[in-house]
Image: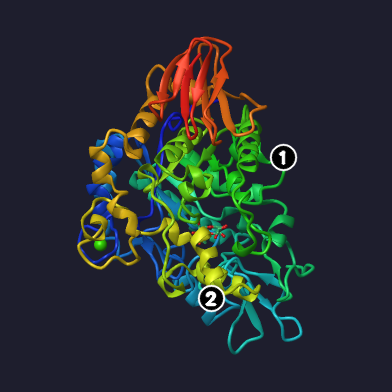
Amino acid sequence: MKKQWWHGKIAYQIYPKSFYDSNGDGIGDIRGIIEKLDYLKELGVDIVWISPIYQSPFVDQGYDISDYYKIDPAFGTMEDFDELLKEAKKRDMYILMDLVINHCSDQHEWFKKALADPEGEYGGYFYFEKGKDGKAPSNYRSYFGGSAWEPVSGTDLYYLHLFAKEQPDLNWENKKVREDLFNMVNWWLDKGLAGFRIDAIINIKKTDGFPDYEPDGDDGLVRCTRMIEEAEGIGQFLQELRTETFQKHDAFSVGEVFNMKEGELEHFVGDEGYFSTMFDFAPLETTLGGHGWYDAPGYDFIRWRKAVTESQLLCQGVGFLANIIENHDEPRGASTYLPDYAQNSDGIKMLATASILLRGLPFLYQGQEIGMKNCRMGNIEEYDDIDTKNQYQVAMEAGLSPEEAMEVCFRHSRDNARTPMQWSCEENAGFTSGMPWLKVNPNYTKINVEEEEKDASSVLAYYKELLALRKAPDYVEVFTYGDFVPAYDGEEMLFAYHRKNENKDILIVTNFGTERTKFPLEKSGKLLLKNREDVLLEEDGLILPKCGAAVVEC
Ligand code: TEU
Ligand code: CA
């Protein structure tokens, strides 16, 4: 495998609106990020991905961009951003932005011009289609509910939006669109950006003719991914994106890729792949329901372990996946990927050990390092997220009571990850001196950075040790390039694996069960890290209590 500058590094996602507010308006901002760079550096972070900070009407929290060349004033100015780049560089840190190019905002000037003249030049930037028998051109349901086609008043046309109606899809078949987007990407890379996280990218290739499919719900619609899955030829677009932009700058790119076709992994993340890496969503997919959040299966350790293991084995020798336990679209990992009895600080450290040492690029999400959890809201109005409001409705229509629908949101809402970062015991968790834009999780008095910095046995302290171990000069090679080899396969509640190369063999063992158990060791070893005092390495075996985790050099 070709060595790259980002191999062996640790990445961290910032959701800027909720990270740190420097001026008391209740909204996190760029200067807030600058103030916390030292905190991130000390944690062990090298690469920082910032969710969208471009000019936006915030229908979907910045994933609806109205000007790709401007910073939204809520976050600061371009000068602030340039300073962020400079300050990051000083600390040998790299900044990634979010590249949202499947769609833009309906307030983007391209779309305004397109609406004014759908037959004109800018009409060709989007998908305008004639309706069929007074109905939409096809029966797709958008990701956020309802038809993916919005009528254009005064015409017989509709425009396509796979997400909200305020997020019209850009027409990638139009060479002019691609050129404009590539120029924009290069403009940012020229500024000194290290790369991008690439949003919802699988959606850029549509199936010709927008055929109808068999409905999959009572609304007569079918999820729009049905059409995306049929589309052929996305590779050409992605290859062009890579050669015209990232490759020229040796930039890092991480794709948000759902619904990839089987057998395409190498094209996506191989040495000559479209992206440096892409997120591994296989664990997440074990938690998704068929019709919505309301029919999602509960957490199942065996299913989760199988998904992680299969992904690891699949990408071995092909490339690297980016490993996560949460992001801004998912509930908190500490509330999702742990059995109830393990939702405590030992369990959180155990999950951290299991996931951070996997083969691939670790991406932490803000607050994960202190063990932030899902946040209970009082009623649906307290949620901000467009998807949560939709899923609440979907749950109610499926016959759930309001209380049950709220419980579904508590388990799955994207706002679980978007509540303000918990910095201290002060009011509003020290996130802002003003009114936070979204509720602060009341557990901030116990779970916060300041307290955990004082406590050597905190989740935060453990994350620091874990990241330092992964990057330690003696071990970075094996943790980066070493193979993933499953261990203790027969043990029902254990997740264990080796990371191995010619020189080293590191065994990672985590006990998700309730029993204190002794496991035989083939070779003698040295304990590099443990999450509890009562994790013991003896001559002939390793003793792991419930929620125990150990890293052993064999
Ligand atoms: O998400 C893309 C995506 O596929 C989502 O539908 C995801 O499955 C959903 O959030 C689950 O509830 C990206 C961004 O990460 C997300 O925040 C944006 O809302 C979306 O694109 C549109 O830009
Ligand atoms: Ca602010």
Q: Earlier in the sequence, mark 1 or mark 2?
A: 2
Q: Is residue 493 visible?
A: yes
Q: Is residue 177 left or right of residue 428?
A: right
From the top left corner, tell me how far across and down residue 315 is, in percent. Answer: 62, 33
Q: Is residue 121 visible?
A: no
> Please, is residue 115 above or below residue 62 in the view?
below
Report which residue position mark 2 lands on. 114
Residue at 59% over, 37% down: 269
Q: Secondary structure at mark 1?
A: loop
Q: Give whichever of 395, 548 is nearer the camera.
A: 548
Q: Is residue 448 left or right of residue 104?
A: left
Q: How busy is the neighbourhood of tag 2: few (under 14 within 10 Å), some, or many (20 plus)? A: many
Residue at 71% over, 72% down: 221
From the top left corner, tell me how far across and down residue 303 is, in percent. Answer: 65, 42
Q: Which mark is residue 263?
A: 1
> Mark 1 or 2, which is nearer the eye?
1
